[in-house]
Image: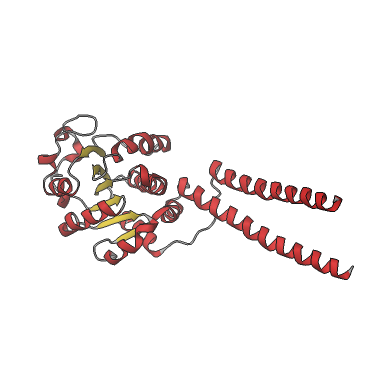
Amino acid sequence: MGVAKEQKRRGNRDKIVLWGVLIILTIIPIIRPLGLPIPIDPMTQEFYNIIEDLPPGGKVWLGNAVGSGIIAEQLPGILGCATRLFEKDLKIVIFNIIDIEAETIFAQRSMPELENRGVLKEYGKDWAWLPYVPGVETALAAVAADIRATITVDHYGTPIDQLEVMEGINSVNDFDLVILFGHTTPFFAYIRQIVPSGVPFITQGLTMDLPLMMPYYPIQAKAIMKGLNGAAEYESLIGWPGLAISASDVLNTTHSWVFIAVIGGNIFYLYNTYVRREE
């Protein structure tokens, strides 16, 4: 009976150690990203190269369709991409079409973080934030064909004709690059309504949506950033460790610990079995 109690106490101590270390290895990368080395997928590299090849002053359509259901996987990507776009002194117009939640989430999550990073340029001159347009794909087609016929004011209620950044921008054809962050619904809408314009199109897709998106790469979609893992790779490329690298670090540290614990547990078990046989 005493042996059974001792084994139970030992088992409880082992569980405390295992879970304690796991919790610590989860918390540390969240508080401070470690930036552990990660391999860069060729498509993420292409996503990065396409943006890097844009000249200063290039015009970028940034499609924001990040709703509450995909915010965990897509927010790091749009933050990393927007950060780099602002760093490169590009002219950015943010469009909120397809997902009605996207504008609110951008206001509550993306904007504060971009402000904290200190990358935002002068509003109206270097970038504009256009309001949500109802109508899903019909709205996208209308905006792509004639922005001013569809949208008259920006997110803040300022007439877009008063925004310097909007000078010379009347349709999707006036942009040098179109970038989309969203799920398959906006992706297929962009494939149908934006890609025929001939403007280069790149996107970040959810990991689970990649099988549906890959047939359009690299003809229609010039590059696809693969979910949260792709966002971590992109953060690594631009030198801005953020939410995605933190998540990647958590996966690496916790999975490494589980691997070590499994190997160590098996070695300990085999050793005890050998000792008991010898006795």
Residue at (43%, 52%) from the top-left corner? 228
Residue at (21%, 34%) from the top-left corner? 154
Does residue 83 show up?
no
Where residue 87 sits, quadrant-wise, is top left
Where residue 164 sits, quadrant-wise, is top left
Q: How many marks?
A: 0
Residue at (44%, 51%) from the top-left corner? 235
Residue 146 falls left or right of residue 110 = left
Give the x, y percent position of residue 116.
Answer: 42, 35
Residue extending farthest right? 279
Front-most of residues 120 and 101: 101
Residue 24 falls left or right of residue 38 = right
| For residue 218, above or below residue 64 | below
| For residue 29, above or below residue 268 | above
Give the x, y percent position of residue 148.
Answer: 12, 40
Residue extending farthest front? 1
Residue 114 falls left or right of residue 273 = left
Front-most of residues 125 and 114: 114
- Locate the C terminus by quadrant: bottom right
Which colour scheme appears in the figure?
Answer: secondary structure
Residue 1 falls left or right of residue 43 = right
Does residue 105 show up?
yes
Give the x, y percent position of residue 54.
Answer: 28, 54
Give the x, y percent position of residue 106.
Answer: 33, 38
